Amino acid sequence: MGLTSRLMTGDGMRRSRLHNYKGQCIDMAGLYYLPHAILTAVLKKLFGYRPEVPWLGYRAIRCLGSLIQHDWKVLEFGSGMSSLWLARRCRLLVSKEHDEAWYKKMSARFAASGITNIEYYLSNQEQYSSLLNHEDHSFDLVLVDGIRRDDAAETAISKVKAGGFIYLDNSDVSWNEYRIAEEKLLSAAGSPSKVKYINDFSPTQIGVNEGLLIQTPADETRPLA
């Protein structure tokens, strides 16, 4: 891939940095976050700075921030800056990670931050999507990121409460496990009114990605905004 193509597309898989992997262009309101994405990308590249926010779309972060309640129990597949952000907003965060080096780094960061409401698990790839020590239908929100997203999405559906929420990061990626994860979550939502796609720039990433937020049925008093 040539330099011009890399500058325009990022990885050669998008039409441009303004398009997600499905070919959808960012809307005008979404362009507001482009300078934020550029700044955090430069800071990470030059100084290793990692902002303590989820590396999801900026509008997805705002959306999740408006949903999460202090008494919520949250599950995430794939740890990182999102873990710190989530733990500060919920009663209990259960986080699963498969990378041992990253697990050790984040464990030290959790300890340094003084955060104690995190159950943090290191799992191999085969056990990554398994969660046997928590009851089904016991989480208010599940964030699906990291590896094996098809299997993690299936676990998310079984573990989330009726009327709870599941967020799939990078739902625009064309790889098979992502497509299967998206299909499973759309089926679990049941109704288009319980589905929200968010096309967005993200911290440290100069390129548009899509996320999928669903609400599971049986809680009509809290419609998905």
Image: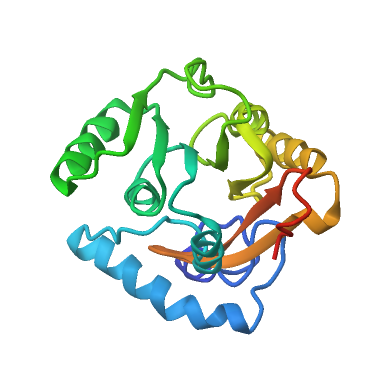
Residue 32 appears at what percent x and percent y? 51, 83
- Note whether 102 is above or below 45 in the view shown: above
Q: Residue furthest left?
A: 112
Residue 201 appears at what percent x and percent y? 52, 68
Q: Quadrant of residue 79?
A: top left
Residue 55 appears at what percent x and percent y? 43, 56
Residue plotted at (42% across, 33% down): 94
Residue plotted at (56% across, 59% down): 67
Q: Residue furthest right?
A: 191
| Side of 174 where 200 appears, left or right | left
> Which one is in front, 220 or 96?
220
> Which one is in front, 176 or 195?
195
> Which one is in front, 96 or 216?
216
- Note whether 39 is above or below 97 in the view shown: below
Q: Quadrant of residue 48?
A: bottom left
What kind of colouring is applied to the model shown?
rainbow
Residue plotted at (57% across, 57% down): 12
Q: Split into 4 quadrants, where in the image is the C terminus?
A: bottom right
Q: Quadrant of residue 54?
A: bottom left
- Tally of numbered discs: 0
Residue 119 appears at what percent x and percent y? 34, 30
